[in-house]
Image (cartoon, rainbow, N blue to C red):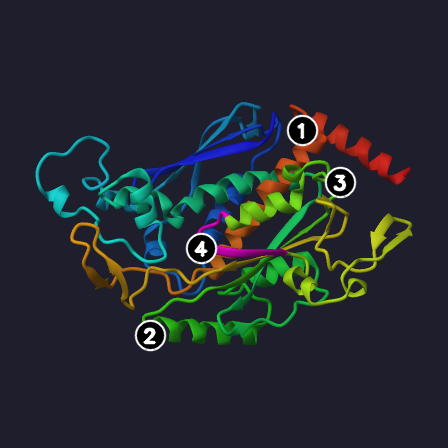
């Protein structure tokens, strides 16, 4: 069975819910680590007041017993603590009276799903769109990805994410730093960068943007080490793992671009400057470089996977943008009460877990089994096959 998940819930509803299907039995669940990744998603310089209201924790209500997965669907719940202020507005039961009509959202915000969703689903209260399209849903996706990440860690696969640009401020290359050191140093940074001087510049830049009533985006990078050759496949377009990762990254709220390895830079270089030469040594086949970001032909080649994503500035601004009232068709400008000036550091964490999910899914397709013991036997047998090739 393929690994998959579904999420449900609204940003101001009582909770976010996720169902994970296809996770093998007998995987030990580290609950502290799971909730730590949810906490990491809430951090980052430039976040709004919502992150002070919520302290996300995932409650597992199915599929895990005595700390180990059973092979049954895993049910996760992430409570919305802000729900208590929205119990009337977000009540699932019909409400009589005119107060709710007065609070109907009929002014779509540029850059959001409000107008498109209202038109598509024929909804005259745009809250029915904005509640679900909110980036709050990524809390559930991080929870799912955190469990996938724990699966991968059982096989020595490590994942790190960091920020390489916020607006005009670009971080210097991290160089040959180990993935463990990258994780350690970015965890200590308010903007998830390695260089301390860059951190200070980014903080000052975000302060300036916020003071001007604007928002700013950036570019984040995810690195995955310890992957075997051959995850994904070249035989069909929808089995190419780099394509699946790209789709997953592009599905994150506000992400507008993705690249693997050197990405778009490959379009301006010669072939001799792009492709990674093949070598063979004590550890088998390897590459002299990693410009292609760990992929060839839609399959992992044993080198670290390197994925970058670009996040646009958050469209909910203190600085007014023009729009049109769907009731009167008249133009208006409106300001908001609460917003993030920059959510790029948090987006880095979200991308880590989206990538982790896609890789875990491909990993189970390759080494599939119903239990961790069966998967490990398949995995070790494949490694022996590679060593003899």
Where does residue 126 sit, x and y in percent of width and height?
Answer: 26, 46
Query: According to the image, label 3 marks what residue?
Result: 230
Q: Left or right: where does residue 161 sit relative to residue 321?
A: right
Q: Nearer the viewer, residue 82 or 233?
A: 233
Q: CA distance from mark 3 to mark 1?
A: 20 Å
Q: Quadrant of residue 148?
A: top right
Q: Quadrant of residue 339?
A: bottom left
**Tag 2–tag 3 contact (CB < 8 Å):** no
**Tag 2–tag 4 contact (CB < 8 Å):** no
Q: CA distance from mark 2 to mark 4?
A: 21 Å
User: Which residue appears at 48% of the width and 49% of the height?
Assistant: 252
Where does residue 78 sit, x and y in percent of width and height?
Answer: 40, 39
Q: Nearer the viewer, residue 243 or 52?
A: 243
Q: Is residue 254 magenta?
A: yes
Query: According to the image, label 4 marks what residue?
Result: 254
Query: According to the image, label 2 marks what residue?
Result: 212
User: Which residue appears at 44% of the width and 46% of the height?
Assistant: 138
Residues in magenta?
Answer: 251-259
Where does residue 100 sit, x and y in percent of width and height?
Answer: 14, 42
Sequence-wise first label, 2 or 4: 2
Disc 4 is placed on an element classified as loop
* Mark 4 residue crowding within 10 angstroms, few (<14) / some (14–19) / many (20+): many
Sequence-wise first label, 3 or 1: 3
- The nearer-to-camera label among 2 and 1 is 2
* Mark 3 residue crowding within 10 angstroms, few (<14) / some (14–19) / many (20+): many
**Tag 3–tag 1 contact (CB < 8 Å):** no
Q: CA distance from mark 2 to mark 1?
A: 53 Å
- On screen, residue 169 above or below 17: below
Disc 2 is placed on an element classified as loop
Disc 1 is placed on an element classified as helix
């Amino acid at each position: 069975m393929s690994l998959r998940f579904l999420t449900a819930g609204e940003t101001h509803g009582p909770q976010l819910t996720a169902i994970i299907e296809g996770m093998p039995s007998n995987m030990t669940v580290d609950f502290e680590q799971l909730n730590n990744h949810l906490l990491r998603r809430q951090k980052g310089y430039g976040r709004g007041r919502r992150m002070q209201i919520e302290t996300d924790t995932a409650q597992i209500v199915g599929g895990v017993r005595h700390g180990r997965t059973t092979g049954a669907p895993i049910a996760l719940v992430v409570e919305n603590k802000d729900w208590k202020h929205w119990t009337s507005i977000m009540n699932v039961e019909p409400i009589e009276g005119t107060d709710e009509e007065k609070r109907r959202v009929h002014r779509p915000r540029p850059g959001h799903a409000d107008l498109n969703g209202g038109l598509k689903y024929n909804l005259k209260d745009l809250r029915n769109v904005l509640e679900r399209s909110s980036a709050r849903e990524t809390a559930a996706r991080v929870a799912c990805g955190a469990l996938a990440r724990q699966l991968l860690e059982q096989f020595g696969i490590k994942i790190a994410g960091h920020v390489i640009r916020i607006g005009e401020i670009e971080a210097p290359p991290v160089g040959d730093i180990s993935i463990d050191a990258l994780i350690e140093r970015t965890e200590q940074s308010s903007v998830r960068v390695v260089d301390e001087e860059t951190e200070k510049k980014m903080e000052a830049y975000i302060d300036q943007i916020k003071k001007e009533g604007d928002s700013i985006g950036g570019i984040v990078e995810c690195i995955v080490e310890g992957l075997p050759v051959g995850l994904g496949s070249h035989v069909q377009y929808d089995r190419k793992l780099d394509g699946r990762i790209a789709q997953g990254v592009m599905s994150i709220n506000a992400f507008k671009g993705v690249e693997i390895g050197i990405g778009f830079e490959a379009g301006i270089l010669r072939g001799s400057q792009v492709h990674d030469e093949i070598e063979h040594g004590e550890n088998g086949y390897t590459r002299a470089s990693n410009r292609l970001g760990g992929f060839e032909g839609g399959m992992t080649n044993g080198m670290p996977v390197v994925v970058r994503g670009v996040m646009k500035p958050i469209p909910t601004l203190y600085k007014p943008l023009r729009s049109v009232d769907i009731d009167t068709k008249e133009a208006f400008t409106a300001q908001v009460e609460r917003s993030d000036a920059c959510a790029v550091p948090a987006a880095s964490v979200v991308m880590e877990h989206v990538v982790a999910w896609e890789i875990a899914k491909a990993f189970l397709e390759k080494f599939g089994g119903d239990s961790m013991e069966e998967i490990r036997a398949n995995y070790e047998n494949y490694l022996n096959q590679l060593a003899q090739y």
